[in-house]
Amino acid sequence: MVDTAIIGTGPAGISAALTLKALKKEILLFGGAQLSEKIRVAEEIRNYPGLPAVSGMEMQMAFARQLREMEIPITEKTVTGIYHMGTHYGILCDQEMFEAKTVILATGVEAVKPIEGELEFVGRGVSYCATCDGFLYKGKTIAVLCTTKELEHEIEYLASLAERVYLMPLYKNVQVQAGNVEIIMAKPRRITGGMKADSLEVGERTLAVDGIFMLKQAVTPSVLLYGLECEEGHITVDRNCRTNLPGCFAAGDCTGRPYQYVKAAGEGNVAAHSAVEFLAGK
Ligand code: FAD
């Protein structure tokens, strides 16, 4: 079991990882090896101390170099669930479970807010994880909302199982290779159903479906970790980045505005120190 699992490879998660590594803690850093898309896409960044007027790509390279130099590997996995086990946390990535004494959530924010009915039907026909739940929809009809091109491989995986897929991509230049996928260029409005979700309203259409996948870069934090206190989509933290759950900390955009690199990196550092303090108390 590691000391701390850090979820997210944006400035908040990277900063937390650098601090914890310097303090000789055992860590797991979960996220994409290409780091946060929100770092890469920035045209020019003018408000990050020490890196005047850098492009997002240059900043990404600087962060990646620092991780390499500090010998911090990235566990290239999407965390699909976090479970508070009383004395520690279980971190589920698809079918694989990791364990950590403390957790730092640095998952950023998803610009796309949950649609009506989405949170109500989570686990009852609404899923955020293609590899965890895709097999449930073998030969069935599903709808997929996808917010980023980076998750197209998950759409193709779902299309290999389902008979029919309605795809609502919220990005341009869709390149999904599958004959059973119907692309609808509109954002869905509402999920409805009884015991389970069974229809999705989009534009003028109501699609009858067996399941709905919401493929996003960041899942609503309270869905990821049951019992986590949130307010208006942000994780509630105190000045020390402590959440309401013991040993669970949060940093960066996921704790609220301003959405800025330096605030995210600063909070990552604070969360790391709080995790160290918590571990010492244990
Ligand atoms: P993010 O950078 O969003 O990183 C979170 C990471 O966690 C992501 O990689 C995500 O994929 C990953 N993640 C989420 N859930 C999971 C999971 N379940 N499992 C594994 N990984 C997960 N700010 C400035 O200060 N100056 C600027 O000039 C500036 N320009 C910007 C330009 C653009 C176009 C954009 C979009 C943003 C800009 N920002 C700028 C804002 C800045 O990008 C964010 O404030 C910052 O990236 C937040 O860092 P973070 O670490 O909190 O989250």
Image (cartoon, grey):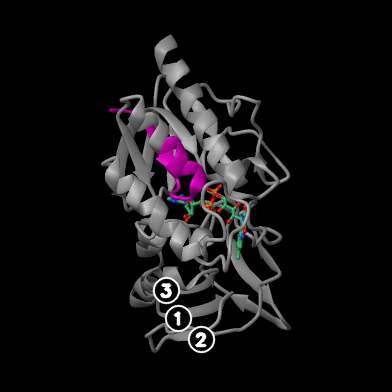
Sequence order check, earlier mark of 2 and 1: 1
Sequence order check, earlier mark of 2 and 3: 3
Q: Quadrant of the C terminus?
A: top left
Numbered tag placed on residue 152 in the rendering: 3
- Give coordinates of residue 124: x percent, y percent: 54, 54
Ligand 1, what quadrant?
Answer: bottom right
- Judged left or right of residue 277, residue 2 is left
Q: Is residue 174 magenta?
A: no
- Give coordinates of residue 134: x percent, y percent: 38, 64
Residue placed most toward the observer, 21 or 124? 21
- 116 relative to 97, above or below: below
Q: Which residue is label 2 attached to? A: 182
- 249 relative to 206, above or below: above
Packing grade of label 3 (10 A; few <14, some 14-19, many >=20) is some
- Give coordinates of residue 38: x percent, y percent: 54, 60
Residue placed most toward the observer, 173 or 273? 273
Q: Which residue is label 1 attached to? A: 164
Name the residue located 58 percent from the left edge and 65 percent from the top edge.
44
Looking at numbered disc 1 in the image, what kind of residue is underneath it? Arg
- Judged left or right of residue 185, residue 156 is left
Distance from label 2 to label 3 (Cα)? Answer: 14 Å
- 73 relative to 238, above or below: below
Q: Are marks 2 and 1 in contact (CB under 8 Å)?
A: yes
Judged from the image, the secondary structure of the residue bearing numbered disc 3 is helix
Visible in this render: residue 199? yes
User: Residues in magenta?
Assistant: 1-17
Numbered tag placed on residue 212 in the rendering: none
